[in-house]
Amino acid sequence: MSYDIVMQRIYAAPLASDGARVLVDRLWPRGKRRDALALDDWYRSASPSPHLRRAWHHGRIDYTTFVCDYRNEIRSDETCLIPLMRLARQGRLTLLSAARDLQGSHLPVLREALLEALLEEDRQDYDAPSSPPCYAENLDSDT
C-alpha cells in the first residue's frame, strides 16, 4: 500500500488537499494563533527532544549526527509514531514545521520513519496467519 505523507511550512496557507494537518515541532511557531493554522493536531512527541534540538541548532552536532540521534529517539519510543500512522492510513497526512528549510529539518527523517513503520506493519499483517478456518459445517445441528 502507498501512503501520502507530505511536508509543509506552517507559515504556508492551508490547502484543501492537505488532509490531516499536524504540527510536529516541539515549540509553537512564533506569531501564529492556533485558529489561523487549520491544525488537526499539535503532536510534539514525534519531534526531536529538546536536548537534541538545541545541540543541532547551536551547531554542537552536524546534520548527519542529528539524523542518526533523531532516528534512535524515534526507535526508542515504540509508540511515538502511532497517532501519525493512524492519520496516514486515513488519507493524506501533512506534516507541518516552522523550519525554513524543510529538507534540512527533522521532517524528512520523520516522514521516512513513518513510511518504514507503516510498511513494516503492513508486512507483518500480510505475513500473519489468516483466521482459523470456519468449522460451521462440522457442527451438529438439530435441523
Image (tube, rainbow, N blue to C red):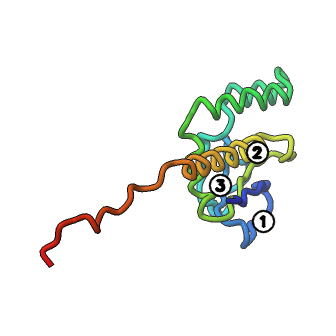
Image disc number at residue 22: 3
Mark positioned earlier in the residue sequence (3 or 2): 3
Few, some or many residues within 10 Å of mark 3 (<14, 14–19, 20+) = many
Image quarter hosting the C terminus? bottom left
Residue 74 found in image quarter: top right
Q: Which residue is mark 2?
A: 107
Q: Secondary structure at mark 1?
A: loop
Label 3 to label 1: alpha-carbon separation:
14 Å
Question: Whole-Å distance between the Cαs marked 3 and 2?
Answer: 11 Å
Circle 1 Cα neighbour tier, 10 Å, few/some/many (<14 / 14–19 / ≥20): few
Q: Do callouts 3 and 2 mark residues in contact (Cβ within 8 Å)?
A: no
- Residue nearest the viewer, comparing 48 with 140: 140
Q: Nearer the viewer, residue 35 or 121?
A: 121
Which residue has dot 1 on it? Answer: 13
Instruction: Tell me, yes or no, whether the two marked residues, 2 and 1, touch with CB atoms within 8 Å.
Output: no
Which badge, 2 or 1, is on the more N-terminal residue?
1
Tag 1 or tag 3, which sits nearer the N-term? 1
Q: Amino acid at mark 3?
A: Val
Taking depth in this image into account, of 68 and 107 the one nearest to the observer is 68
Q: Residue at x 57, y 40 (%)?
A: 80
Q: Residue 79 placed where, x, y %?
A: 53, 40
Of badges 3 and 1, the one in the foreground is 3
Inspect the image, locate mark 1, and give the three-letter code of the amino acid beneath it.
Ala
The image shows residue 108, relative to residue 32, as above or below, that is above
Q: CA distance from mark 2 to mark 1?
A: 18 Å
